[in-house]
Image (spheres, rainbow, N blue to C red):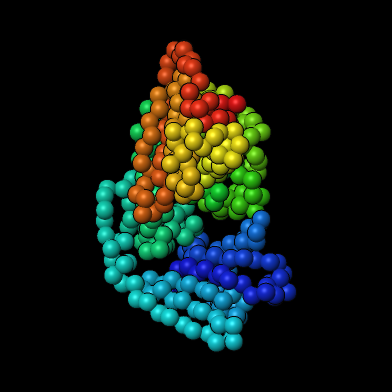
Amino acid sequence: MILSITFSKPCSNIAEILGKDYEKIKIKIENSDGKTGYFMEMFTQKQVFHKHFTENELENFIKQHAGTTFKNCIERTDSEEITILGSKKGKITRIVKKLEAAASVQTAPEKNYIIKEGAPVPFLVVLGVMTAEGKVVASRYSKFRQINRFLEFVDDVLPYVVNEGQPVRVADFGCGKSYLTFAVHYFLTEIKKVPCQIEGLDLKKDVIDFCNQTAGKLGLENLNFRVGNISDYSGEADPDLVMTLHACDTATDFALEYAVSRGAKVILSVPCCQHQINTQLQQNRKGKIKQDDNALEPLLKYGLLREKFSSLLTDALRGEWLEQQGYRVQMLEFIDEEHTPKNVLIRAVKKEGTTEKKAIPKILSDLKIEPELWK
């Protein structure tokens, strides 16, 4: 059975064949009502389109487009990875690699997860992470681990957000396909038996439509999704917990600012793509700061190192800012780097009482940078 397939390297007349200039197509298995189907994500340069396939429709799509419309296709089953390559002369090559060893390593129990394998979890089945029998799909094991790791953090902060007789209010900014949003709802309602109200926010309407349809399909209450921009979002109720996973660049800052302004008790944020400071440092090397006068010049002149430094500095300044707003802050490892390089989680818990604000960090003036939270 096909678990996933990725189509890339489109032909020059892709728009004539499929109607749009798709750059990549990803298809993953999904299970609903005991039936196996497939969920397709079709990426243009600026948009993502979704579609659902039956097994027969997927097989026909592969026959029509693998190696022709798309010159590179990688198909995964439980036991094989199949690469289909198309040459300029029209020759199609099929390369098969066995995956039994890899699958056995992935399915080996690593720890006592909060959500366990063996019994089907409805949202994981619908999202294609689990089979209808409760087995984690081999190619989705990293997602399964990521979900469980995040729930560990939620479990740790639960005492700070539970109010007896009141639902826990959660806002998930940049929710995307909402694996974590559904996971937190399941964790609170089914495992902890804690009432909750959860809202996910994302810019992409098609993604939000998919999430609302999934929530409806699962019959989930007090879980809804909205299209919107974090920078101008205004929820009806103040959240107890604000969470973000890979909200890109300053979107993370807007989420942190919103959480603080609404008095969120806990913030769990996994940042991503910290471009702002990197761009400012790159520009400053050309004008505002003389390279000979900059003690950090050996670190900043190499693009790769400057990018990594900018990422660390961005999150360090976010932590400093949150502390000045009255939060106790920790920087924690979210998940192993082998699964994602974006593995820093900012954990902020609101302290009681008032906090005396400190001076603006000197490094801002030294490097002549202006991060979003310090404007």
Between 375 and 246, the one nearer to me in the picture: 375
Location of residue 150 (image quadrant)? top left
- Percent x, y for residue 52? 59, 65
In the foreground, 192 or 43: 43
Q: Residue at x 41, y 41 (%)?
A: 344
The vertical placement of 239 against 115, above or below, is above
| Left or right of residue 163, residue 370 in this image | right
Which of the two residues, 229 or 359, is positioned nearer the viewer here?
Answer: 359
Q: Quadrant of the C terminus?
A: top right
The picture places residue 125, in percent across and down from the top left corner, at 45, 58
Q: Residue at coordinates 56% horizontally, 69% vertically from top-left? A: 8
Using residue 145 as the reference point, say whether residue 260 is left or right of it.
Answer: right
Inspect this view and state whether residue 172 appears: no
Horizontal side of residue 303 vs 64, given as left or right: left
Q: Going 54% across and 34% down the picture, which residue do you hit?
A: 290
The image quarter in which residue 3 lies = bottom left
Residue 172 x/y as whole percent: 53, 39
